[in-house]
Image: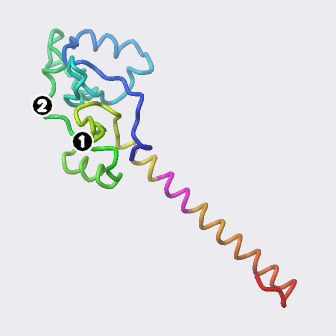
Amino acid sequence: MRDSASRNVTALKTSDELGEIRRWLASGEAKSQFLGYPVLDDSGNARGIVTRRELLDPAHPELARIGDLLTQPPLVVFEDHSLREAADHMVEHNVGSVIVATREAPTKLAGVLTRGDLVTAHSRRLKETRDTDRHIRIRQTIRKTLRRRTPDAKL
């Protein structure tokens, strides 16, 4: 899974003001276009993930702190988990992304894994399987062709 998680992610701080974050989201900056953001406390510990929808919800006042929007503890998977385990965790908790951490530093953000990351990894695996199957079929075709040309040769 460590190859599938996004590593260079933009994190928000629990102490950030919602109004400030909303202005940043409206700026159109590339990093302000994600559907969810990990949230870290002032010590750099992962506290959860906040969605774009939550950040833009007008029910939350401009002066609210990002930490106030978090409704559950952080959902964490470890780098040594399989993608299947991570997907199961996401489905079980009905979330679109989880925090990735190492076992050595379970509260520190190592990355984020999203549904999109899972789909990309699955697509890559399917492509690799198709390519492997294609190579096997090509080798078998070459062997058959060579056998026909040189029936006494061992291949």
Position of 138 with respect to 32 (left or right) is right
- Disc 2 crowd, CA 10 A, few/some/many (<14, 14-19, 20+): few
Q: Quadrant location of residue 139?
A: bottom right
Viewer-proximal residue among 2 and 120: 2
Above or below — where is 103 with respect to 67? below
Q: Are marks 1 and 2 in contact (CB under 8 Å)?
A: no
Is disc 1 surrounded by few (<14), some (14 to 19) or many (20+) residues within 10 Å? Answer: some
- Which residue is located at x 31 percent, y 10 percent? 23
Residue type at mark 2? Answer: Thr
Q: Which mark is residue 117?
A: none
Q: Nearer the viewer, residue 150 or 97?
A: 150
The amino acid beneath tag 1 is Val
Mark 2: which secondary structure? loop
Residue found at the far bottom of this picture: 152
Span of residues in magenta: 123-129
Q: Position of residue 104 (x, y in %)?
A: 27, 38
Q: Which residue is mark 1?
A: 95
- Image coords of residue 129 (percent x, y): 54, 62
Helix or strand or loop: what does disc 1 sit on? loop
Is 71 magenta? The answer is no
The image quadrant of residue 149 is bottom right
